[in-house]
Amino acid sequence: MRKHYHTFAGYNAWANRRLYEAAAALSDTEYRADCGAFFKSMHGTLNHLLATDRIWMKRFTGEGDAPDRLDAILHEGFAELQAAREAEDRRIIAWIDGLDEARLAGVIRYRRVSTPDEFVQELMPALDHWFNHQTHHRGHAHMILTSLGKPAPELDLLFYQRVVAAGVGGS
């Protein structure tokens, strides 16, 4: 299973890079426009992805800062948000690469951001949820780009796997 999660961590960083490259071409007005996505704008969506990654990494590792809101705006400026995203992706890859099979078979305990309830969760299904959640909201960001009439990058996992197999720009 380590290879499986290594693939997803690499895919996550790759897809984020591609999405940020496309978002960088937006004007500030476009970047902040309410396009009807769950977190409204590209700005809100990208901040949500970073916020939830930090929340989950805090749950997984017990380390790092985690916001107390799912709609937290961690960075107002695009450049600062992009730098934070790149750092978080490196952190995610390093943590995933350090997991062994025994740890993957373990559990985590955490509290939700929205309630004080404590949960005990097997780690692998939590990782599956986490990587799926990232893909879900990158889909929102993809929709924002297309709704603005902008080119949207190919983000399919299968495309990433082909890029890695060809050795041309994967993780």
Image (cartoon, rainbow, N blue to C red):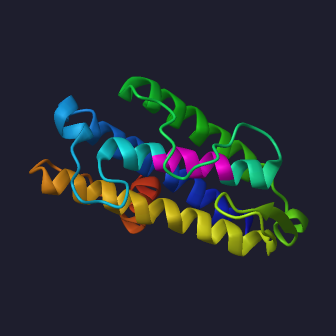
* Residue at the image position 62 percent from the left and 71 percent from the top: 128
* Residue at the image position 17 percent from the left and 31 percent from the top: 27
53 to the left or right of 151: right
Closer-to-camera residue (138/45) = 45
Residue 53 lies, in percent from the top left, at 60, 50
* Residue at the image position 23 percent from the left and 49 percent from the top: 34
Residue 83 lies, in percent from the top left, at 49, 27
Closer-to-camera residue (21/71) = 71
Residue 91 lies, in percent from the top left, at 67, 39
5 to the left or right of 34: right
Question: Is residue 140 something that shows in the picture?
Answer: yes
> Considering only vertical position in the picture, is 24 above or below 111?
above
> Considering only vertical position in the picture, is 144 above or below 157?
above
52 to the left or right of 1: left
Q: Quadrant of the N terminus?
A: bottom right
Q: Quadrant of residue 111?
A: bottom right
Question: Is residue 97 something that shows in the picture?
Answer: no
- Callout count: 0
Q: Look at the image and say whether residue 67 sits in the magenta stretch.
A: no
* Residue at the image position 64 percent from the left and 47 percent from the top: 68
Q: Residue lying furthest left in this view?
A: 149
> Considering only vertical position in the picture, is 98 above or below 130?
above
Q: Which residues are magenta?
A: 48-55
Residue 139 lies, in percent from the top left, at 34, 62
- Magenta span: predominant SS is helix
